[in-house]
Amino acid sequence: MKLYSTKNKAFVVNLERAIMEGLPPDNGLYMSKIKPLPLTFWEKFEENSFQENSFQIAKHLFEGSISDEKLAEITYDAINFPAPNYLLNDEIATLELFHGPSLAFKDFGARFMSRIMQYYNGDNNQELIILVATSGDTGGAVAFGFHHVPGFSVVILYPKGKVSELQEKQLTTLGGNVHALEINGTFDDCQALVKEAFLDKDLNTQLRLSSANSINIARLIPQSFYYFESYRQISKNIRKTKDITYVVPSGNFGNITAGLMAKKLGLPIYHFIAATNVNKVVPDYLSTGEYEAKPAVRTLSNAMDVGNPSNFPRILDLFESNSKECSTWNNVKNEITGIAVDDTQTENALKEVYQNYNYIIDPHAAVGYYALKKYMESHANTYGIILETAHSSKFKPDVERILRRTINVPERLAILANKEKVSIEMEVNYEHFKNQLLSKFLIKK
């Protein structure tokens, strides 16, 4: 598999380098030309398991970069929990992506990536330090994915006071090779610190660094797998008669990028809805053609509080146009509708889903539900699938306040509640961050 930088397509690397580096040296993002899956894949698509289809997709994309035997082992081990569609009514479903160890969709990517990285790390005797910025769920999934994996340490940067209590416990209580930095700033500040570290030549000569955000292609690829699994569960009659539309609660735009990649691979998705909270940089772009990053605003759907989505350049790359008749902007807005939702609308959506369907969604999926209902007002033939990206109990105080009922917390999350939080509080200062990394890890080199 050959990958290029979104900032310079002439800069080409192999899969191992793209994954282990995380980012190209020019601060672009690694991407690859997506070729449609062969007809042989579709011949067995319906009967194959989620794991087998995932392996076949990875095999197609990786083009022999990893042996079939090893790639199958990695994929079957990583994708070892389900991704079921839950039907709310005849035209709306949720795709439950919270059945993994950290109760969030990030588990699919984090587990797959950790196993790929362990394979490529081999017997290297210098520790690989995984840097990850999180607005909520990424950090927990990566922490669980790499916890106690030999040869790796994880450094999680999260915005102080801007993640839920149980999300924070997932970041700060595992210990061992997992370290949490509590940043007095926003998610965008955390992300900027991580990116600067990758571009710091001095730091990179002293430490081995890599990324576990969806800026790393190894996180992004497995997120395409569950779109195929979801589509496989839709009845053939609905596929033939309805416009299959995926509603993706979006912050850093990795999840919807993975869905667009799935469509490029040949999955017959009709349309995507990028459902954001009031941090609506991308919906504004889709409306005006102008992209303007802005400071993130805090909302109920905290994992989507992103003012400069990292993966957006990948979307532009997927739909890049060389035609004067049809611009990249036109190509993108033909595939995606952007709808922004405020906190009041989010709360109303959460209540409506509970009252109408006796189903409890989290605030991010509530954003998706509201956006879908808005979209369906003018698109009557839609069959909408909302990505339910995290278990509602991760946002227990807000969900209980909104619904006025107790939310049960799964045991694997509940046991964290009484564990002691261990984190280092830091200001948004790159030199302080760099010195923290060097003081903690340089001695281990």
Image (cartoon, grey):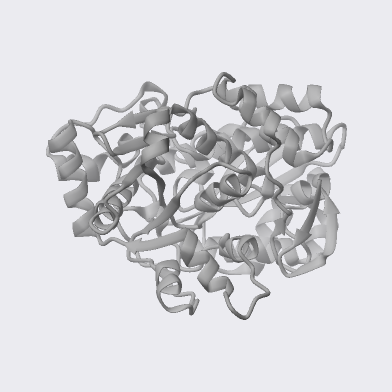
Q: Is residue 315 above or below residue 356?
A: below
Give the side of residue 49 with respect to residue 273, left or right: right
Is residue 152 among what the camera can see?
yes
Is residue 157 among what the camera can see?
no
Q: Is residue 433 above or below residue 70?
A: below
Q: At 58% across and 69% down in the image, what residue appears?
A: 429
Q: At 49% across and 74% down in the image, what residue appears?
A: 293
Q: At 80% across and 43% down in the image, what residue appears?
A: 444
In which quarter of the view is residue 325 placed? bottom right
x, y (%) of residue 319? 61, 64
x, y (%) of residue 280? 39, 67
In which quarter of the view is residue 222 placed? top right
State which quarter of the image contains the C terminus.
Answer: top right
x, y (%) of residue 281? 43, 70
State which quarter of the image contains the N terminus.
Answer: top right
x, y (%) of residue 355? 12, 37
Give the side of residue 386 with respect to residue 400, left or right: right
Q: Nearer the viewer, residue 206 or 293?
A: 293
